[in-house]
Image (tube, rainbow, N blue to C red):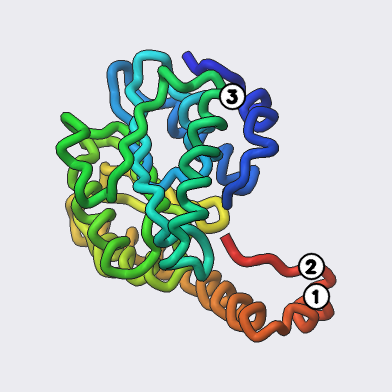
Amino acid sequence: MSTRTFEETMLCVHDVEGWMSFDQAERLYRVAAGAPAGGTIVEIGSFRGRSTIVLGSAAPVDVAIIAIDPHAGNDRGPGEYNGFERAAATDHDVFKANIAAAGLTSRVRHVRAFSSDAHHEVPGDLSVLYIDGAHRYSPARTDIREWGRRVAPGGTMLIHDSFSSVGVTFAIMRELMLGRTFRFVGRSRSLAEYRADLRPTTGGRAANAFRQLLQLGWFSKNLLIKVLLSLKLGKVLHKATGRQPEWPY
């Protein structure tokens, strides 16, 4: 049984900084709440703990929760790829404080390491894998491939910034578009959900690829928004849509 309702969880993370919308948190909560007894949830990329708190609040009490984040100052956020060591040290302190404030210090095990170096810290198969780590193509692909192999049959993998980040999207296309294991379930904005229960038939794989290809229209829209924002042309978007533009996530 979850330790908090979804409504209580959203109140808990209201002031916690991070790139996770309401509908994404709802999907993450639902998947974590459905983790089997004695299972393991792994999060790659915790930042200041917003998604970690959602996982820790939703998962049944006998499910292990492991948060992997080196807080090293690389891939910290949009456009923040390297050179943010001082900010990352603050992120680490704030992460610990936020987890403590949520009453999850004994519930969540934090592994301060790069995901590629953390496999030995996590025993057994995974019930749920949430990837929100490095967004460049090579490390994103490695996370999907190497950690994805550890998801138990019928388990769930969620990937943030899917069909939004170029690196993450290309990694998905390479590893999952024509894959044999993960079925695309759906997405909440850029949070894509995959289930390790894909039918091992040509038709099943083709249908799965087609459902993912349909997301590329949304991906193209996100690229256009990012280009316009990077060129300081947000006013153009504001006039076209009537809404204040934000970085797509």
Residue 202 % position (x, y): 20, 61
The quadrant holding residue 121 is: top left
Q: Are marks 1 and 2 in contact (CB under 8 Å)?
A: yes
Q: Are marks 3 and 1 in contact (CB under 8 Å)?
A: no
Q: Residue furthest front?
A: 86
User: Residue at 47% across / 26% down in the picture?
Assistant: 56
Say if residue 244 shows up in the picture. yes
Q: In the rendered structure, which amino acid carries the disc numbered 1?
A: His
Q: Earlier in the sequence, mark 1 or mark 2?
A: 1
- Of residue 181 and residue 3, the one placed in the foreground of this image is 3
Q: Secondary structure at mark 1?
A: helix
User: Residue at 32% across / 41% down in the picture?
Assistant: 112
Q: Which residue is mark 1?
A: 238
Camera-nearest label, 2 or 3? 3
* Left or right for 202, reference 140: left
Above or below, 238 relative to 63: below
Above or below, 32 relative to 158: above
Q: In the rendered structure, which amino acid carries the disc numbered 2?
A: Gln
Q: Secondary structure at mark 2?
A: loop
Q: Earlier in the sequence, mark 3 or mark 1?
A: 3
Say if residue 156 shows up in the picture. no
The CA distance from mark 2 to mark 3 is 32 Å
Q: Earlier in the sequence, mark 2 or mark 3?
A: 3
* Left or right for 1, reference 129: right
Total labels drawn: 3
Q: Which residue is mark 2?
A: 244
Residue 17 % position (x, y): 62, 45
Q: Which residue is mark 3?
A: 101
User: Residue at 19% across / 51% down in the picture?
Assistant: 146
- Of residue 28 and residue 89, the one placed in the foreground of this image is 89
Q: Secondary structure at mark 3?
A: helix
